[in-house]
Image: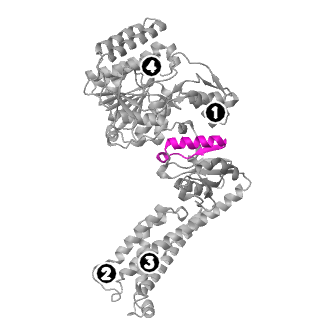
Amino acid sequence: MIKKEWIYSLKRISRVLIDLSLFALSLAISYKLRLEHDVSIEIKSWFWSSQFPFVLPIVLSLRLASLFVFQIYSRMWRYTELNEILELTKPIFASSAILALPRIFGFHAFNELFAIPFGVIIIDSALSLIFLSSGRLLRKQQIIRRTLKKRQKENNNKSKSRTLLIGAGQAAQELIRKVSQHPEIDIEIICALDDDARKQNVKISENVRVVGHISDLNKIIQEYNIEQIIIAIPSLRQQQIREIIELCQQSKLETKIIPGVDQLAEGKVTIEQIRKISLEDLLGREPVDLSIPEVANFINNKTIVITGAGGSIGSEITRQLIANFSPKKVYILGRGENSIFQLSQELNRISSVPFTPIICDIRNYKFLFDHLKHISPDLIFHAAAHKHVPLMEDHPMEAFENNVIGTKNLVEIAGLLNIQTFVNISTDKAVNPINVLGNTKRLAELIVNEYAKRFPKTKYISVRFGNVIGSRGSVIPIWENLLKNNLPITVTDKNAYRFFMTILESAQLVIKAGAIGKTSEIMVLDMGDEVNIDTLAKDFLRLSGYSPEQSHIKYIGLRPGEKLREELVGYYEGTNSTKYKKILVIEPRKASGNLILEAFEHLKDLSNSSSKDIFRNSLLNEIKKLNESEQSIPANV
């Protein structure tokens, strides 16, 4: 231990001596350059007998003291980066400013021993920065070379995948640099493709050249014996990424991608961020801009409650609020203790925003009221719901209890407590509904709008969107589990279509819609084009390394309550565009509040006494009558 400390002290002293030598060299060169063409001065005699030997110890002491003041020696040379170089400017600039003080106060250069010429100070400052930076960078390069040689010896026998990069921009160059620094990784980058004409046949690193356009992919794969493809263009639009992925799939080679710019920390690429292509990449969904002032004002310094926070959407809303904004406090409320506990554990690791977990059933009015009265939140995001279509067909009363009674409890309490905003998360299943889930969520929408009239101090909004790919209960986890157990993946119908969006996008759009919406409005998120489930299944199999032609798909037919195609706007509704991309609004219609609440009370009584078949039929009939009555009343009347 003592020996290690002694060695460390010697190394630190050697770094100081090197810096002093570089400072002395810099000052000598500066005087030489400054006086080289000054014929009025005998350079040789002055240089060695006059000012230079006098100011040398002053300059060295001042420069060295500045390095210590700015804690330059607390940084290791082997880890020098651009920010460390920039840090060196501080001590050099500070010490140069002090050296210039005699001249600033009127002392004359050469006539006064301590008045250094401005030219010498400027040249010396520049040279000092260059010399110190070079010394540190050379040391870093020495360490890198030594480490690389050691790693190469250890990994000489390991086979590496011959890799083609798609993209030759900054991200690709960063990736090449990282791969060269980590020879233990099984990647050997051979060449790159890019559609930029200026980059054709240009070297983007010592060993990697741009050898063609992206359309040349198959030819280049054969010519260079490529085994793997990495897409390294994070700035591409999603539709362009999809086209490139489809081209790569034709090659049947393993294809990976680096995340988009919005997902890269400080725009830098790391090896860990290279991942396999996912179905989310194929959806062609554009990132959501949450930077508008309305969203920040809506969230920052607010106390927020998220119901159903343990679910896919509720948990992602929580993450987005914490990652992108500064709420005062977040309460994560849910009935399932395990999911709330898991989210709490995650937030403990990543969150600097105060949060509190709450275990509460939204159907229990008293407990819910007591919690919300104590919390006194500004915003409620209501994500709690039963949402599995076939299960809810078999359990219609349970769906009604949770999706309708639970929502009514929340909207009533929100109004009584004068909570600023209530955001209800709805679904495309509520449009022209034919199943229990859709009818309960449509009734919930109508109840939210009715309470908006009763409590004008609270802003009530519903946000409607389609399927969320990758969420719990969605097709992706189901297919993954089937493949894991060597079973064919199931598809309901070859002609079934669904709207899809990512969990991230859905959560961000819910937040944005809540910020910009007006009370009683139903905000409809632009889901883009419908996706054929059969096509999605085949894409999934290809990405999982299977051939769709090898009978890995089993067609099971539509399940109870399912449609061939979903809708986002009902026959009884009309939409208006907003100034914000991806968000449409359904104008509120003044449907009879008495009819809505009468239907609610009737169904509530039936849920306690009737069979599930009678209740299901009654639910469908009641919502059909409400939709028809709403259709007969013009908007804004």
> In front of the other: label 2 or label 4?
4
> Is residue 347 shown to the viewer in this render?
yes
- CA distance separating discs 3 and 2: 19 Å
- CA distance separating discs 2 and 1: 76 Å
**Amino acid type of disc 1?**
Leu
- CA distance separating discs 4 and 1: 30 Å
Q: Residue at x 57, y 67 (%)?
A: 139
How many other residues sit within 10 Å of disc 4, few (<14), some (14-19) or many (≥20)?
A: many
- CA distance separating discs 3 and 1: 68 Å
Q: Which residue is mark 4?
A: 438
Numbered label attached to residue 60? 3
Q: Residue at x 31, y 32 (%)?
A: 378
Which quadrant holds the C terminus? top left
**Amino acid type of disc 4?**
Gly
**In the depicted structure, whether residue 98 falls above or below residue 331:** below
> In front of the other: label 3 or label 2?
2
Left or right of 469? Residue 608 is left
Q: Which residue is mark 2?
A: 103
Residue 231 % position (x, y) = 58, 47
**Amino acid type of disc 3?**
Leu
Question: Is the Cβ of the residue at disc 4 closer than 8 Å to that at disc 1?
Answer: no
Q: Residue at x 49, y 17 (%)?
A: 392
In this rendered view, identify the residue nearer to me: 35 or 495.
495
Q: Earlier in the sequence, mark 3 or mark 1?
A: 3
Left or right of 115? Residue 182 is right
Left or right of 605? Residue 214 is right
**Amino acid type of disc 2?**
Arg
Numbered label attached to residue 541? 1
